[in-house]
Image (cartoon, rainbow, N blue to C red):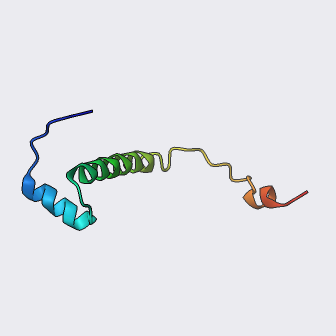
Amino acid sequence: MATNLALDPDLLERAMQVGGLKTKKTTVTVALEEFIARRQQSQLTGLFGTIDWDESYDYKAQRQRS
């Protein structure tokens, strides 16, 4: 999908250098992927402490072979 964006050229150049990337397209794609991954991770951390824990659960018993 072709999209025209007005990006800060200095910022884009820095991102290319830091990422060791050769093209603007690759740089923007990697940046978007990392942005999405970070946002998804931050949403997961919001779940900590919200799940009920069964104190009697023995996870080691599940590892034993029959």
Observer-nearest residue: 64 or 25? Answer: 25
Image location (x, y in percent) of residue 54: 68, 49
Q: Give whichever of 28, 62 is nearer the camera.
A: 28
Q: Is residue 49 left or right of residue 60?
A: left
Q: Nearer the viewer, residue 45 or 66?
A: 66
Task: Decide if residue 65 is on the left or right side of residue 1.
Answer: right
- Position of 18 relative to 9 (above/below): below
Work out which quarter of the rendered image holds the N terminus and state it. Answer: top left
User: Which residue is found at the position 50% from the left and 49% from the top?
Assistant: 49
Q: Position of residue 16 (x, y in %)?
A: 21, 61
Asked whether, in this view, residue 57 is left or right of residue 29, the answer is: right
Image location (x, y in percent) of residue 42: 37, 49
Vertical arrangement, residue 1 with respect to residue 33, above or below: above
* Image quarter hosting the C terminus: bottom right
**Residue at (14%, 60%) from the top-left corner?**
13
Frontmost residue, 40 versus 17? 17
Residue furthest right as drawn: 66
